[in-house]
Amino acid sequence: MSELRRLKKYPNRRLYDFERHCYVCLDDVRALIAAKHDVQVIENETSNDITRETMMQVVMLLEERGRPLFSNAFLAQLIQCRAVDTGGMLGRYLDDCMKTFVENIDRIRALARDSAEGSEDVEELSDADALDLEIPIPAPRA
């Protein structure tokens, strides 16, 4: 990520961007994050950091539009695993998987593009081996 953008949430549920000096909506927050800006959201009344909650709202907004990212089965499994997760292992695992995905996104896009174009090279590749991805298995933290 890059430049930190500080936003303040007021009681009327409006978000204010101090750099642009204007109110913004969740779509604007999504655009900032997509542009690789770090975002911090502070609740005006309590001074609590509500960045995570705001990001969850952005995810929900994205889920309501178009094709959902998360299937019902995935969400059910997430809830079930969260219920028995001790020590935050599930969260660390998902964080590590996302980091691996982001680090390899250009290669994944190239393979998908080549596959769509019918490249012969792609036919020789096999699933995860083709991407040479190491899916992280988080070590227990003390």
Image (cartoon, helix red, strand yellow):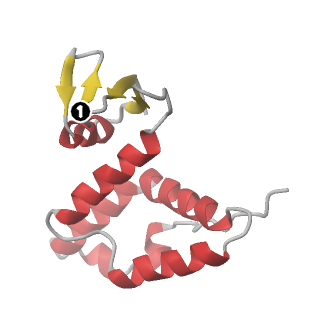
In the picture of the structure, the residue carrying the numbered disc 1 is 14
Tell me: residue 49, above or below residue 94: above
Please state the horizontal and vertical placement of residue 124, each as a whole percent of the image: 37, 81
User: Residue sitting at 35 percent across and 62 percent down?
Assistant: 108
Judge left or right: residue 15 versus residue 137.
Answer: left
Please state the horizontal and vertical placement of residue 34, each as a whole percent of the image: 29, 42
Do we see residue 74 in this rendering?
Answer: yes
Please state the horizontal and vertical placement of residue 105, each as a whole percent of the image: 37, 55
**Local crowd size for mark 1, using a 10 Å CA cut-off: few (<14), some (14–19), many (≥20):** some
User: Residue sitting at 67 percent across and 68 percent down?
Assistant: 137
Residue 28 vs residue 33, the one in the foreground: 28
User: For the view shown, which residue lies furthest in the right direction?
Assistant: 142
Count numbered badges in the picture. Answer: 1
Tell me: residue 119, above or below residue 42: below
Tag 1: amino acid: Arg
**Secondary structure of residue under mark 1:** loop
Judge left or right: residue 48 versus residue 92.
Answer: left
Tell me the quadrant of the picture where the N terminus can be found: top left
Quarter assignment of residue 93: bottom right
